[in-house]
Amino acid sequence: MLEDLTLKLDKALKKVTGQGKISEQNISDTLREIRRVLLDADVNYKVAKKFVDDVKEKALGTEVLASVTPGQLITKILYDELTKLLGEESRELKLNPTGITVILLVGLQGSGKTTFAGKLARYLKSRKRSVLLTAADIYRPAAIDQLKLLGKSIDTPVFTIDGSKDAVKIAEESVKYAKENRINTVIIDTAGRLHVDENLMDEVKRIKEAVNPTETLFVVDSMTGQDAVNSAKAFHEQVSFDGIILTKMDGDSRGGCALSIKAVVNEPIKFMSLGEKLESLEVFHPERLASRILGKGDIISFVEKAQEQIDQKEAQDLEKKLMQNKFDFEDFLKQIKMIKKMGSLQSLLGMIPGMGKALKNQNIDDKDLVKVESIVQSMTKKERQNPKIINGSRRKRIARGSGNTIQDVNRLLKQFKEMQKMMRMLKSKGGKNMLKNFRLN
């Protein structure tokens, strides 16, 4: 996520990192390069200029401690200003504690509204809300079918009126249906257009007036850069919204949309979406994205994702097995399934400090995880528990059963053996105490 921006900012900071002391000259040189990086990332010109001016003012007005290098100082100021630019603090979704909550999704066609509706429904259900999805996009037949499929996958009802071409009526009736069936949250998926036009705005206005939503959320494709910011501005001027959703943040996004949109429309970013999986949705935390952009990772989000998937007893059992060197392919398979639920490998590794730079230009493909899983699943239970018995004929059977080559099977077995060796070393060096004493900085 935003790896290109991270690498370019890191390169720009090298101009001041090696300096013995901070000066107006080396600050100016560094910030000139940072301004160029921001503009290349398609950040709004006015936003980029103000950002650089604010950083310069802070940098030149800060007393430098003897223990702080110029590189550390400018990085800290950049982090503070990026956090401020992105919204300073996370803003929660407004949910009525009693009565019904109506969430209206608006935005251009192709922004990812329908997929986000499914993700939001899953997110709210995990927080004990009852949810109804409303298919109010009457122009794109695939949108209704897509929403029905998403609803089925998360066991959530989808409200439609067969044959109706009245989006306002569909929205109104869905709210009535929710009240009658004691459903406390309605998510309305509206139609989009390829560009902002009068018909689109008129329909959205009428739906909003009819259902009086608790929250109106503008869903935007972060890969479209300044076009996304311009459409957000146009929407907000005619149909005010309460928050922004950044979708496709795992794609080839240069960062211009994420860094500009809050400053331009002055509304908070509430969620960001990273991938097609329904679980790939994150509450937006400005300080965490600022940390990722500066290559410092986001360990807090990583731990939160892990905690959502890890059962405490299973974690304790796993620790015991690791320390007793009894970790086998059965346990390995459980961990693969847990990692898959957490999100894409690329996004997870990006949360670990320094990984973005270390994995520069390397394509981390989730298909590799699927391949490993298929190999392990093709083993018998006895083979998973005791990999030493996997001889040549067994390897051929496993390769054939999983649709992989014998070389793939051999490679996995070798890697697993190396991992077990590492675990033995950890045990001999007092690994139990190391695990118990681990703390996040």
Image: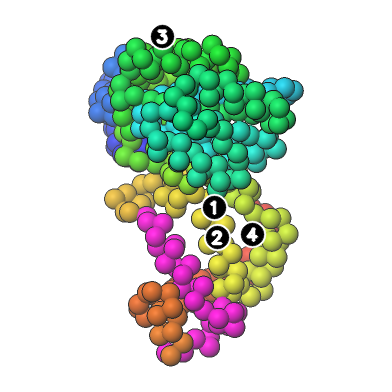
Q: Earlier in the sequence, mark 3 or mark 4?
A: 3
**For mark 2, what is the residue?**
337
Q: Mark 1 touching mark 4, by CB under 8 A?
A: no
Task: State how far apart marks 1 and 4 are (Cα).
Answer: 27 Å
| Residue at image mark 1 | 341
Pick whichever of labels 2 and 4 is earlier in the sequence: 2
Nearest to viewer (mark 2 / mark 4) = 2
Residue type at the position of mark 2: Lys
Question: Who's the residue at 64% across and 48% down the image?
Answer: 307
Name the side, left or right, on which 240 lies relative to 435.
left
**Mark 4, residue position:** 434
Nearest the viewer among 346 and 438 is 346
Instruction: Determine if the magenta segment contains residue 365.
Output: yes
Residue 96 placement (x, y as % from top left): 69, 22
Task: Give the answer, above or below, for where 390 lies relative to 434.
Answer: below
Residue shown at 58% from the left, 14% from the top: 212
Q: CA distance from mark 2 to mark 4?
A: 26 Å
Q: Which residues are magenta?
A: 364-392
Which one is earlier in the sequence, the residue at label 2 or at label 3?
Answer: 3
Residue type highlighted by circle 4: Met
Q: Are marks 1 and 2 in contact (CB under 8 Å)?
A: yes
Q: Is residue 304 above or below residue 335?
A: above
Query: Circle 3 is placed at which residue position?
Result: 237
Q: CA distance from mark 3 to mark 1?
A: 39 Å
With 101 as the anchor, is 379 left or right in this view?
Answer: left
| Residue 437 part of the magenta-drawn span | no
* Residue 252 visible here: yes
